[in-house]
Amino acid sequence: MKLIYLLRSLVFSIGQITTLIFFSVFGLLLYPFSHQVRYRFIHYWARFCIVWLRWTCGVKYRVFGSENIDFSKAGLVFARHESAWETFAFQAIFPQLTFVLKKELLKIPFFGWGLAMLSPIAIDRNAGRKAIKQVVTEGCQRIDDQVWVVIFPEGTRMPAGVPGDIKSGGAMLAKKALAPVYLVAHNAGSCWPKNSFIKKPGTIDVYISPPLDVAALSVAEINQKTEEWLFAPHRPPKKEAV
């Protein structure tokens, strides 16, 4: 069985890397155009990866709470980070978005080029307060441009089922931007584990909270609500939203 998983994961990776090179090279020609044009092109690679993952590795997903998303107003997404899966899937679930990420990722050939076209908020995680200030400043700019911002409040990829410490940068951005905050829990790490080449077949459940109005909340209260949602033992409702 492990050999089958290995072979299927290999086929997925071949397709993923081949198409990444295609999208990255042709995407470079779009740099003179707007962020919206670049996003429309490069995000199809993420959508392809999700479909390709299902075909090759048998990884499906279900979304609960998609009706909570207000597509008319840019928001913030505070989510668990368990694998690379959510960086692809969120581009199919939410409107035009970008990520807060470590700047080293932009140096990766082809992959970094594609990320750059999403106009990410690339920070030095060792910069402390300077990095937080950058997240707040650039995050507000993205929201003003009607671009959603995805933040992983734990600051790094975590193994499935292992909670991490919630950092304050996301909550501080929420208070400054006064944008609706969507909390997103999922179990992607159960199918695509951290630092694992092998993808296991299964269904990833994604739980999206109603938009959180942060106007009357403190940074600590936002973090508490984030922690409660991300680490809660969610269960699929009887009526599923797929």
Image (cartoon, rainbow, N blue to C red):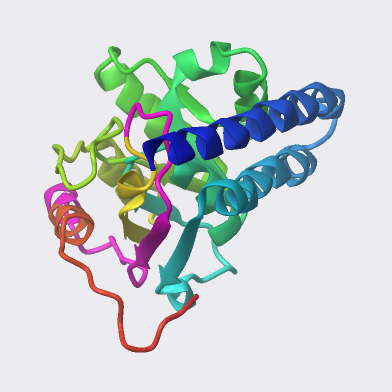
Q: Residue at x 32, y 44 (%)?
A: 189
Q: Is residue 144 visible?
A: no
Q: Quadrant location of the N terminus? A: top left
Verify whether residue 216 appears in magenta: yes
Q: Is residue 69 above or below residue 188?
A: below
Nearer to us in this view, 223 or 218 = 223
- Given the current orientation, which residue lies at the most extreme bottom position? 239
Nearer to us in this view, 201 or 67 = 201
Tell me if 137 is positioned left or right of 148 in this view.
Answer: left
Q: Is residue 112 above or below residue 150?
A: above
Q: Is residue 123 above or below residue 229?
A: above
Report the magenta stretch's main SS: loop
Q: Is residue 76 visible?
A: yes
Find residue 108 and report its horizontal and vertical position in percent.
Answer: 57, 13
Q: Residue at x 87, y 24 (%)?
A: 29
Q: Residue at x 64, y 33 (%)?
A: 16
Find residue 195 and report its horizontal and vertical position in percent.
Answer: 34, 26
Tell me if 178 is positioned left or right of 148 in this view.
Answer: left
Nearer to us in this view, 234 or 102 = 234
Tell me if 196 is positioned left or right of 104 in this view.
Answer: left
Count numbered badges in the picture. Answer: 0
Find residue 224 and report its horizontal and vertical position in percent.
Answer: 12, 54
| Magenta region | 194-223
Q: Residue at x 17, y 50 (%)?
A: 223
The image quadrant that residue 34 belongs to is top right
Find residue 64 and report its horizontal and vertical position in percent.
Answer: 39, 73
Tell me if 15 is positioned left or right of 77 in this view.
Answer: right
